[in-house]
Amino acid sequence: MFYKCYLKRGTVYLPTTVSQGIAVYMDVDPVTVVPVADTDHLRRAMLNTIPKENPFRARSVEDARKPPVILKYTGDKSWSAFMRGASVWAIYEKDGIFEIEPYRVHPKGYWEPDRDNFIKFPSGTSIDVVIDRMIAILQSAAGASTKPSPAAQRKKS
């Protein structure tokens, strides 16, 4: 199982993630949109959207030509515009072991897994524990991104 969630401007975007073959995934509709501060709604949304197994959807030329589905929900005009100010995490499950993996922007401008900061849960950890940790990470990241800079705080005083 592979699942992604995005955070931008205090909103969490939870797309449906389909498998397109070995280690190839794509975000598709529906996308659930939840304010990061609404913990109960976010927990329910994640429980309802994280798949036990990613459904398969064959790759197509049309899919390659479409803009990423997430842009329809964020209002961004391009993927690079969406990436500015956005964060992404993936939740993996293999053989009953969950991992949360953050992504970072590569110097060439694309997202890459940040293997130095992933969280691996012990075997047998429930999805509820993983979701609670993911919510804490999202809310912490949103709090950090919405705090004014020290320079902005000095201007106010």
Image: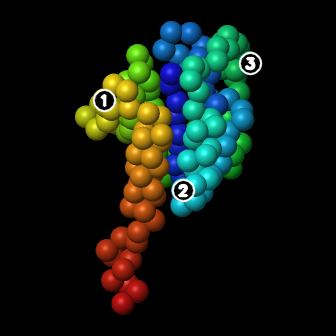
Up-down: is 62 above or below 101? above
Q: How is the image coloured?
A: rainbow
Sequence order check, earlier mark of 2 and 3: 2
Q: Can residue 76 be seen in this view?
A: no
Number of dots carrying numbers: 3
To which residue does mark 1 refer? 122
Up-down: is 27 above or below 60? below
Pair 1/3: label in front: 1
Residue 157 image point, x, y percent? 36, 90
To which residue does mark 3 refer? 62
Sequence order check, earlier mark of 2 and 1: 2
Pair 2/3: label in front: 2
Tell me what residue is drawn at x 37 percent, y 27 percent.
124
Residue density around tag 2, few if under 14, some if 14–19, many if 20 or more, within 10 Å: some
Tell me what residue is drawn at x 47 percent, y 34 percent.
127
To which residue does mark 2 refer? 39
Q: Which amino acid does label 1 sit on?
A: Pro
- The foreground one among 125 and 52 is 125
Residue 27 image point, x, y percent? 62, 29
Image check: 62 left or right of 78?
right
- SS class of the residue under badge 1? loop
Image check: 85 left or right of 123?
right
User: Quick check: marks 2 and 1 in contact, CB under 8 Å?
Assistant: no
Question: Distance between the Cα atoms at labels 2 and 3?
Answer: 36 Å
Sequence order check, earlier mark of 1 and 3: 3
Q: Which amino acid does label 2 sit on?
A: Thr
Q: What residue type is labelled 3?
A: Glu
Residue 45 image point, x, y percent? 62, 44
User: Quick check: marks 1 and 3 in contact, CB under 8 Å?
Assistant: no
Pair 2/1: label in front: 1
- The foreground one among 10 and 107 is 10
